[in-house]
Amino acid sequence: MPGMDRDLVLEALSTLTNASVKCLDPGESTDSELTVYNFISTTFNYTVDSVNVVASLLKKIALGSSEMDHLHNELFMDMENFFDPIYDYDFRNMTDSSECSRGGEPYKRPVGWYRFALKVKNKYPDGNAWLGSIGWRTQSEPGEWPVSFHGTTIEGAKGIARLHFKAGDRCAYGRGIYSTPDITIAKGYTKTFISKKTGKTYKVIMQNRINPQKRKITVKPGFWLIPVPEGTTAEQEKEIVESSIRPYGILIKEVTQ
């Protein structure tokens, strides 16, 4: 099966950011450029590198920030520095019943989806152990983080973030970033878009790794929480996101009748 058109991922990012995401031509520059070193600080209220653009977006959506209502109409990005196509993976025709784990947690591969890989390798100061080694394997590796999925719409995210779960052993509740290790649950919170290029409808989900030392398990089955307390500053929120949850792929799936 041929790979999925890379123009679709720009449309997917436009859907996630509520902006028109465009690709920069080689040598082109702009005041609204998205690079590996910065992001439009006026969009998310602080500067982040391109690996954390989706993480920053995820945080803003999950916290229900009013800043989501004030995004720029256009964002620009360098595809070569943002994506890592050598690690793209086509799960669309896969039939997978094998059991495996990532970060000590069960991992169910996103069968039926196509993954566009983000260029995250060698981007974090603590190395690459959180990603584990490249290639198919059934077992976790030392230092590896579990996989989680985040497919939340803005309205859905606000609803999840405002849920108050009953406190108890290994239970979390309150304000923060919610994601799920279950792709089936994540599908219930996807955003959809109609491609201008193909005319078809697609769903989009973020695939992440989540720090097991900072993740809380909710009493509601299938949800994990990265707590972000009320009163946390923008700089503190940035630090929490970068050290707790790291998107490494964007999953896209065609919606069929």
Image (spheres, rainbow, N blue to C red):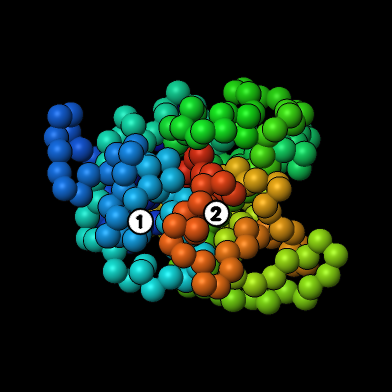
The residue positioned farthest toward the right in the image shown: 169
Label 1, on which residue?
A: 46
Cα separation between marks 1 and 2: 14 Å
The dot on residue 174 is: none
At label 1, the amino acid type is: Tyr
Quick check: can you spot residue 30? Answer: yes
Label 2, on which residue?
A: 240
The quadrant holding residue 7 is top left
The quadrant holding residue 38 is top left
Q: What element carries label 1?
A: loop
Q: Where is residue 92 in the image (x, y as percent from the top left)?
A: 54, 37
Tell me which label, 1 or 2, sits earlier in the chain.
1
115 with respect to 77 (left or right):
right
Q: Is mark 2 on a helix, strand or loop?
A: helix
212 with respect to 21 (left or right):
right
Q: Where is residue 165 in the image (x, y as percent from the top left)?
A: 73, 74
Q: Position of residue 239 (x, y in %)?
A: 51, 51
At label 2, the amino acid type is: Ile
Q: Where is residue 62 in the image (x, y as percent from the top left)?
A: 51, 64
43 with respect to 127 (left or right):
left
The residue depicted at 57 percent of the width and 33 percent of the height is: 126
Q: On screen, 130 above or below 231? A: above
Q: On screen, 60 above or below 26? A: below
The quadrant holding residue 70 is bottom left
Viewer-proximal residue among 210 and 111: 210
